[in-house]
Image: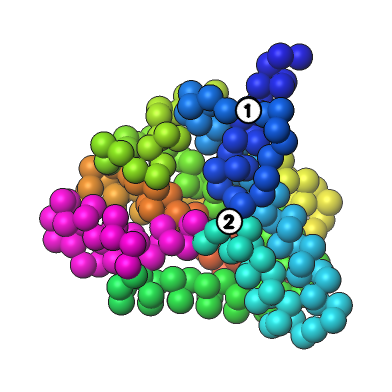
């Protein structure tokens, strides 16, 4: 029983860290808990997907699909405090404008947004919205519950495989080494919703496989780039991986629908 309560605490700590949602007072807080809460980052994605899906379903009943998608996307961004979008913008600025490791890290730490960041964030959000409103309502809801957890798993894989590149930073408290057991929990949190949707026939198995493959490739490609440029990852890198992986998953699912493989 104590172990279950502790796992619940870790989930709520992750929820508090990655979203604006309040958590129960009984959870409490100890700094050491942050080291292990990242295992539930994909489960936080399930919560974000649930909120985005509810907003989309309600808005789609009142408005055309483009408006519903924009409102749903706005709700998800508000819920997470634009945490991941900010990371994407910072990584685009740092990797686009920095030549040395020190300069890349310095630019990424700057709170101001530059041209690379504005373009990268704008294109990412734009493609995300365009892909979602090209899908019918049931497929959009399925896509949200697949992409949000899986994209966060892609980000978690960097914590599992790599070292933190800064002496301190926003993600430093959660950047301790992740064990195989903890990564397995993260995989389960992302995999169960996706497998349930595929089993229920809401998404084709091949489309799901394409989405998973796309997210894995994003994690590998951006992870390798981070390792080469700054010797590890930062919180901004995690946000960038999450955002790019989310978009790639939507595009993979849309490709199957567009070519008639998803009916």
Please indicate whether residue 233 sits to the left or right of residue 15 in the image.
left
| Residue pictured at 73% horizontal, 46% vertical | 193
* Secondary structure of the residue carrying numbered label 2: helix
| Residue pictured at 66% horizontal, 49% vertical | 21
| Residue pictured at 74% horizontal, 81% vertical | 65
> Residue tagged by mark 1?
28
Asked whether the viewer can see residue 131, the reply is no
Q: Position of residue 121 (x, y in %)?
A: 44, 71
Q: Within 10 angstroms of label 1, few (less than 14), some, or many (20 or more) residues?
A: few
Find the residue positioned furthest to the left.
100
Instruction: Report the span colored magenta.
Output: 83-112
Which is the main secondary structure of the residues drawn in magenta?
helix
Find the residue positioned furthest to the bottom.
64
* Secondary structure of the residue carrying numbered label 1: loop
Q: Is residue 106 magenta?
A: yes
* Residue nearer the viewer, 165 or 137: 165
CA gap between label 1 and label 2 equals: 21 Å
Label ID, residue 80: 2
């Amino acid at each position: 029983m104590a172990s279950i309560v502790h796992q619940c605490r870790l989930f709520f700590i992750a929820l508090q860290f990655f979203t604006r949602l309040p958590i129960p007072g009984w959870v409490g807080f100890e700094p050491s808990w942050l080291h292990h809460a990242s295992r539930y980052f994909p489960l936080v994605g399930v919560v974000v997907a649930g909120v985005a899906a509810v907003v989309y379903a309600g808005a789609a009943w009142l408005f055309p699909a483009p408006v519903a998608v924009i409102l749903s996307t706005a709700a998800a961004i508000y819920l997470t405090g634009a945490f991941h979008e900010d990371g994407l913008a910072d990584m685009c600025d740092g990797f686009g404008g920095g030549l040395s490791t020190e300069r890349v890290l310095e630019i990424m730490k700057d709170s101001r947004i530059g041209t690379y960041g504005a373009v990268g964030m704008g294109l990412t959000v734009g493609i995300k919205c365009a892909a979602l409103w090209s899908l019918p309502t049931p497929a959009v809801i399925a896509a949200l519950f697949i992409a949000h957890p899986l994209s966060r798993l892609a980000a978690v894989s960097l914590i599992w495989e790599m070292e933190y590149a800064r002496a301190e930073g926003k993600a430093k408290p959660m950047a301790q080494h992740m064990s195989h057991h903890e990564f397995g929990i993260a995989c389960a949190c992302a995999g169960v919703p996706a497998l349930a949707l595929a089993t229920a026939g809401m998404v084709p198995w091949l489309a799901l496989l394409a989405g998973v493959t796309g997210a894995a490739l994003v994690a590998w490609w951006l992870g390798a780039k981070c390792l080469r440029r700054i010797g590890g990852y930062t919180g901004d890198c995690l946000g960038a991986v999450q955002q790019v992986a989310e978009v790639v998953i939507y595009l993979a699912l849309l490709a199957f629908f567009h070519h008639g493989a998803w009916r």
